[in-house]
């Protein structure tokens, strides 16, 4: 009898996992509590993969030998708890895909900066002419690419949710950008649980492997000694000190190992301190992979940036509009505000994940001239920010948010959408939220 694999969730990752499972000859079934998008249905139907939508049929699911869970499904979902009671192994799509490829894995995690860093590393590898795939939270699902393509390298952005259900997977180069509070609603509001999830990126590393990390992160520093790390260290930081693989000094970035080279900070495509770190992490990863320094320099110089991340939308009547919809936590918004050179109208709000707004309090006082709360439940925002003496507006649609910003923004100011929150109260996703913002700005 064929081993039965059940996939829960039929988005990008679930559909990819199903295609790989079917290709490897497993008895494959897909179940999604929501409706499945048409393009994914087509992909499943073309391969005769059974699926259901709008429900989880226990009889069909709990007969599984193994369950592949989409990262969006919480670990305490009723069907997951029932599967655990029956001791059915539950893994992530990335874990499953990793079993069927010998490609080298460059994996990036962190609370912030991971999408930009992942995209940047992919850009460098591609420019170097390597056979490389982009996967994880961005790009096509890893399982789909393992089934349908034959890449030598995969550059994978990993969220803590993906890491939660990874056990044997092995990152040849693991990159940890930073750790700040995020998704605490999924980790029993215990920061340590979230930290432990992030450090799972290092499991199964050997002495041949590399660990690239931000050396000035207090949480990383505190936790490093706990995890029995086997890979070689490649730390980076803003200022020069002993043992760094990259640092900046006198407007230059210095990469020290394995091949030493430098470049002017002005040559970097991306600006702001956080992007300096993203560029360092990407440069080190490419350097470890043996990519020529000339190629790394050139790629760091001509990278185009990531949509919904500090993306300039338009200038209307002397006011700059910036889409940072990808800022789904407070630390992300901190980086955005920190990089603002002008007075700013900040649009924030959405589904709160246990946020602590103290982190941005000083920057809001220093840089903001108005706050627009975009969400169904803005009580927490009012409780925190009302004492700042700034004009505030409550809105429940993107059009109203942009209209309110347009009315109060003065020439020379910036309107910044950097929500600090998840988008699911009013939008389908952070992309949908960012796209609506861009559309409304273009209609001004």
Image (cartoon, rainbow, N blue to C red):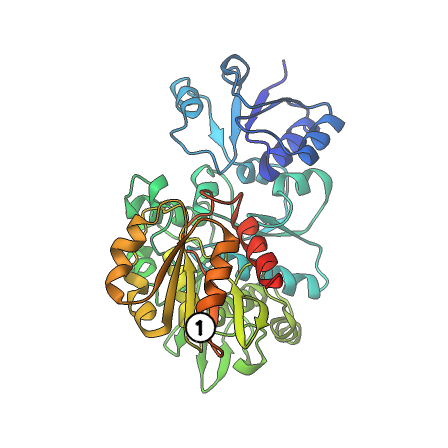
**What is the residue that sits farthest to the bottom in this orientation?**
250
Above or below, 347 against 167 in this view is below
Quadrant in which the C terminus is drawn: bottom right
Q: Is residue 211 left or right of residue 32?
A: left
Disc 1 crowd rating (10 Å Cα; few below 14, some 14-19, many 20+) is some
Q: Residue at x 61, y 39 (%)?
A: 12
Count of numbered circles in the view: 1
* Callout 1 secondary element: loop
Camera-side residue: 7 or 411?
411
Along the line of sight, the residue nearer the viewer: 148 or 224:
148
**Residue 227's x, y, as percent?**
34, 49
Asked whether the viewer can see residue 357, the reply is yes
Residue positioned 47% across, 29% down in the render: 90
Is 437 displayed left or right of 233 in the figure?
right
State the residue at coordinates (33%, 70%). Answer: 363
For the N terminus, the image quarter is: top right
260 shown above or below 185: below
Q: Position of residue 17 (x, y in %)?
A: 61, 34
Furthest-left residue in view? 387
């Amino acid at each position: 009898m064929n081993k039965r694999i059940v996939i829960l969730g039929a988005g990008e990752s679930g559909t990819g996992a199903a295609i790989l499972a079917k290709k490897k000859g497993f008895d494959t079934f897909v179940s999604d509590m929501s409706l499945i998008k048409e393009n994914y249905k087509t992909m499943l139907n073309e391969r005769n993969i059974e699926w259901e939508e709008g429900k989880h049929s226990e009889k069909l699911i709990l007969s599984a030998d193994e369950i592949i869970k989409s990262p969006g499904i919480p670990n305490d979902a009723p069907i997951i708890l029932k599967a655990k009671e029956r001791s059915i192994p539950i893994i992530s799509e990335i874990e499953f895909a990793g079993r069927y490829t010998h490609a080298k894995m460059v994996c990036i995690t962190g609370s912030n900066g991971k999408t930009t860093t992942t995209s940047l590393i992919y850009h460098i590898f591609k420019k170097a002419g390597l056979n490389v795939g982009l996967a994880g939270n961005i790009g096509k699902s890893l399982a789909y690419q393992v089934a349908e393509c034959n890449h030598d390298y995969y550059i994978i952005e990993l969220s803590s949710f993906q890491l939660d259900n990874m056990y044997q997977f092995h990152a040849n180069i693991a990159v940890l950008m930073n750790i700040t509070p995020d998704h605490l609603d999924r980790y029993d509001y215990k920061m340590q649980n979230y930290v432990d999830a992030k450090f799972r990126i290092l499991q199964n590393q050997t002495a041949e492997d590399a660990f690239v990390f931000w050396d000035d992160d207090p949480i990383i520093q505190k936790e490093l000694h706990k995890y029995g790390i086997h890979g070689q260290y490649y730390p980076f930081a803003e200022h020069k000190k002993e043992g760094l693989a990259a640092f900046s000094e006198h407007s230059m970035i210095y990469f020290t190992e394995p091949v030493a080279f430098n470049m002017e900070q002005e040559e970097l495509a991306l600006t702001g301190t956080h992007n300096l770190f993203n560029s360092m992490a990407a440069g080190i990863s490419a350097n470890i992979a043996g990519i020529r320094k000339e190629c790394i320099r050139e790629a760091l110089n001509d990278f185009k940036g990531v949509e919904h991340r500090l993306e300039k939308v338009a200038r209307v009547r002397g006011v700059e509009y910036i889409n940072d919809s990808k800022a789904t936590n407070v630390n992300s918004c901190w980086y955005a505000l920190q990089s603002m050179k002008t007075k700013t109208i900040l649009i924030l709000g959405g589904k709160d994940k246990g946020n602590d707004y103290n982190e941005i309090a000083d920057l809001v006082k220093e840089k903001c001239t108005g706050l627009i709360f975009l969400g169904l439940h803005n009580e927490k925002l009012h409780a925190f920010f009302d004492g700042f003496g700034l004009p505030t507006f409550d809105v429940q649609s993107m059009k109203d948010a942009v209209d309110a910003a347009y009315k109060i923004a003065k020439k020379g100011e910036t309107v910044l959408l950097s929500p600090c929150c998840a988008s699911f109260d009013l939008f389908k996703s952070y992309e949908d939220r960012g796209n609506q913002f861009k559309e409304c700005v273009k209609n001004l």
